[in-house]
Image: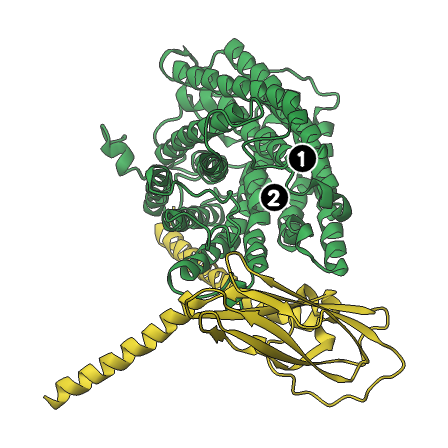
Chain colours: A yellow, B green
Amino acid sequence: MDGDNNSKGNNNIVLKLSITALLMFGFGFALVPLYDVFCEVTGINGKTDNERYQGKAFEKDITRQIKVQFIARNNDAMPWFFNPIEKTLTVNPGESILTYFHAKNPTLDRMVAQAIPSVSPGRAANYFHKTACFCFEQQPLDGLDSIKMPLIFVVDPDLPKDIKTITLAYTLYDITDKAAVEVKITKLSQSSINDSYLTRRD
Amino acid sequence: MAGPDKGFSRWLLATNHKDIGILYLWFSFAMFLLGGSFAMVIRAELFQPGLQLVDPNFFNQMTTMHGLVMVFGAIMPAFVGLANYMIPIMIGAPDMALPRMNNLSFWILPFAFAILASSLFMEGGAPNFGWTFYAPLSTTYAPPSVTFFIFGVHLMGISSIMGAINIVATIFNLRAPGMTLMKMPLFVWTWLITAFLLIAVMPVLAGAVTMMLMDIHFGTSFFSAAGGGDPVLFQHIFWFFGHPEVYIIILPAFGVVSEIIPTFSRKPLFGYASMVYATAAIAFLSFIVWAHHMFTVGMPLVGELYFMWATMLIAVPTAAKVFNWITTMFKGALTFETPMLFCIAFVFLFTLGGLTGLMLAIAPADMQYHDSYFVVAHFHYTMVAGAIFSISASVYYWLPKWTGRMYNETMGKVHFWIAFIGFNLTFFPQHFLGLAGMPRRIPDYSIQFADFNMISSIGAFTYGLAQLIFLFNIIRTIYFGEKTTEEQTWESARGLEWTLPSPLPFHTFERPPAIK
């Protein structure tokens, strides 16, 4: 048997297959953005843009009306009171609408919340544009405080004709812990900067 | 050439493919008994409605650990062990291509499973989120031991990937002259394709648990909607691994059955080439059907339709295989030794499991079947009657060749019939339970499910007992079995392994054999 040839061939195969395995490990992570891109392109999963809509302005389409329903709910142990001020609106596509959601923190502690929107039917997600939304940012609220949170949206006139009702559901998450961690990290790094500054001056 | 070392260092420092194969096979048997004992706890609790033996959280730990240990600890290492032992012999190679890496990939496993099993004794208990470990159950709501679980999965993944690389290198580089790809035994072919599947998807699983780790400890939000992530993303990534995984488990079983059925039918395998192409087709399709596990997450209609049709397409190559096995048996001079009995049961019961798979593939019907006992029945027909039956068959088939001693045929047949009856008693009623609406992974159930559950539990204890007979028969054979030195243990067996003496010498094919 030709030992040299074999070990060369083995090394070659091991190298190629190890690289494949590493690439597939990367592919697992690449699935995260790919999945988002796929949902965005196809408009499935009810994922809406979580950024301010900056596209073209629309002309009001007076030939049809769309019923827009609002749902507000809390995730898990979130204790806030959270509800839409108007449960249902009837709007014309292309028309810019302002509405509010109400939130109250019934606890005595300051908390931070994040609202996550979801549109159904999923096909409507790409045609529901938000020009202002409380869901774009984290919402801190002191204990026993309440707030009226604005939403400005416009329904795209290109919305498929068979969709007559759009439901926008917000789920409110308690992210106090996560927000606190971030604050702590910035504080820590700041103090370490100061420390090193002090040491150098000494 | 030197013989084996004496004592424990023979096993700890093993680089001989047969020794490593033996290690893998015994390890998988130990894990099979461990996972089986978890199943006994599950079935004992479900013997009657109400909570009798264990509390619900421990019950959930049992279902989780049963699944993990059986899939990653029992079935996969058993087939890797068979591959280590048989592939070099079947292709006329002196050993595996990378013997030292082979040693490492085995010895990682006991540590991985010690870590996983130790979580049972930790505060908060073992993982309790199901073997599919869906986020956020496995992240936000997981017991603290989840980190050990993640590390265990990483280790298993590394072991599997190294094992797979070794198998591919062996098959590509060490075939005897004249052993062309299309002359390879089907067991070698199915393992070659399985190895590629492993290399492609085990890293994706590693990625999924790494993301869990980061979500739990490093403040990322891959699977947490609050931070802009998506729990459904977890299911997509998991099943991108998970569906090829079920073929990783079943393809080597196809290979084993394709070796054994021709032997006891005294005919060559019908449709060898079509078997190879069907295996490749199944492997390819396994990558594009993953979301059929997720019909109820709220996919759009086009998604449901695509995954439904693509899944049903898998029935075509699979059916080609089943017809080939049946045609091999057709008008053959059949005898029914224990390995053949297991293989015939495999063909029959695996086909039933495939048919319920087709039922589950119908998206609108799946809305009802999803997460019910129907699913449990379905995948046990494929995993137990598919993978475990074929492993049992292969042990009986090759044990005389490995040990130079014949197993007790009567005891083998008793094992088969008790296992066959016990298996069907356990899992056939679960179809009815599922259709009637009993959900899976629950420690207590509504009173109308009581009778079928009791039958199912009795069947499970019976099946468990059968495995002890199996274990006894193997040990008895090794020490007291009737000696056989025949090269050809089975009169019509084909393949290079039957040209070698029994028991197999420590080193084989140091000179490559001539292939006709």
| Chain letter, disc 2 residue | B
Residue B233 appears in view: yes
Extreme residue in the right direction: A63
**Residue A109 circle label:** none
Residue B513 in the image: x percent, y percent? 46, 35
Residue B57 falls left or right of residue A131? left
Q: Quadrant of the image for the C terminus of chain A?
A: bottom left
Number of callouts in the render? Answer: 2
Residue B405 falls left or right of residue B411? left
Residue drawn at point x = 60 percent, y = 20 percent: B454
Which residue was labeled with disc 2?
Answer: B182
Rendered view: A7 above or below B188: below
Q: Nearer the viewer, residue B375 or B239?
A: B375
Residue B259 in the image: x percent, y percent? 58, 30
Q: Residues within 10 Å of mark 1 (few under 14, many from 20)?
A: many
Residue A156 in the image: x percent, y percent? 76, 80
Rendered view: B430 above or below A137: above
Residue B134 falls left or right of residue B329? left
> Disc 1 or 2, which lies upstream in sequence?
2
SS category of the residue bearing label 1? helix
Rendered view: B308 above or below B400: below
| Chain letter, disc 1 residue | B
Task: Kindly indicate whether the residues beneath marks 1 and 2 are on one polypeptide chain.
Answer: yes
Rendered view: B299 above or below B181: below
Looking at the picture, which amino acid does disc 1 mark? Answer: Phe
Which residue was labeled with disc 1?
Answer: B374
Looking at the picture, which amino acid does disc 2 mark? Answer: Met
